Amino acid sequence: MNKNGSENGIQETLCEKIYNTKAQIVRELQAPRYTSDDSYVAYRGELVDQLHGAVIELNDDSFLVKRHLRYVEIFRKLSAWNSLETMEISDIKEHIAPLIKPKKEDELARRFDYLVYSIDLGLLQSKSVQTSVNIVVQTAEQLSAKYSIPQVEKQRDIIEKVQTTEFWDSVTIIELETVRNAMRSLLQYLDKSMRVARMQTNAGLVEDIYTTHK
């Protein structure tokens, strides 16, 4: 077991990746260009509520939580999330994210969450996100063949819009949040052979984002 409590010692769990990415998005949204826009302020507030709430829910009787209790207590204070800088992001990654347990929900949905949050962060940091965008477009194309399923048909407008160049030319992370919420639960309807995709992370690493379930 490594110092942050991860049994594998190297790989972050999907839950950790999502938590860390959301924390970095929260940090980027501190920039003045976003703090003057009510929609971005509200979105940052939602993310903070989720991140902070997960810390509040940690079990103090847990051995791992006890090992990092100093940091848990810090980030249980809502004020700690008002301004995240490099040190806070590092502390969250090392001492908080490894303690967060995933909620019981569809694995493909959570992988789609990570994909979209990674695009959000890339856009905020002015990094290339084309590989990840291509995966979202391909996913929408595959869902287009599933309109016979009522849940998919209900999201037809968003599924079709995501496939257009115009959408991505001017997309905002607020619009991507709508896409994430609309599409995340639909991946379960894809054929198993289609559940394969790879993305390039903001750190330049290539990893599987969807995997074939047999």
Image (spheres, grey):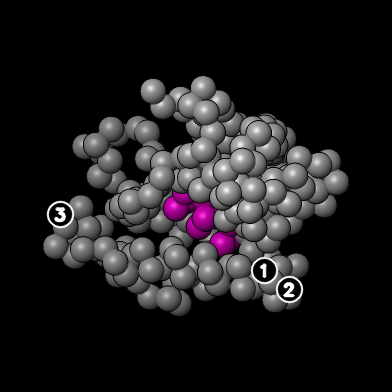
Q: Which mark is residue 63?
A: 3
C-alpha gap between disc 2 and disc 1: 6 Å
Label 2 SS: loop
Going by the numbered disc 1, the residue's amino acid type is Tyr
Going by the numbered disc 2, the residue's amino acid type is Asp
Label 1 SS: helix
Residue 43 in the image: above or below residue 17: below
C-alpha gap between disc 1 and disc 3: 37 Å
Residue 21 in the image: above or below residue 108: below
Residue at position x 45%, y 65% in the image: 50
C-alpha gap between disc 3 and disc 2: 42 Å
The location of residue 67, given as percent across then percent down, is 20, 55
The location of residue 135, given as percent across then percent down, is 64, 33
- Give the number of marks: 3
Check if mark 2's residue and mark 1's residue have beta carbons within 8 Å.
yes
Q: Which mark is residue 37?
A: 2
Q: Earlier in the sequence, mark 1 or mark 3?
A: 1
Q: Is residue 73 left or right of residue 36?
A: left
Q: Is residue 19 magenta?
A: yes
Query: Around disc 1, counting alpha carbons within 10 Å, would you say few (fewer than 14), some (14 to 19), or many (20 or more)?
Result: some
Query: Around disc 2, counting alpha carbons within 10 Å, would you say few (fewer than 14), some (14 to 19), or many (20 or more)?
Result: few
Is any part of residue 136 visible from this angle?
no
Residue at position x 69%, y 34% in the image: 141
The location of residue 71, given as percent across then percent down, is 32, 63
Residue assigned mark 1: 40
- Magenta span: chief secondary structure: helix
Q: Is residue 10 left or right of residue 68?
A: right
Residue 166 in the image: above or below residue 52: above
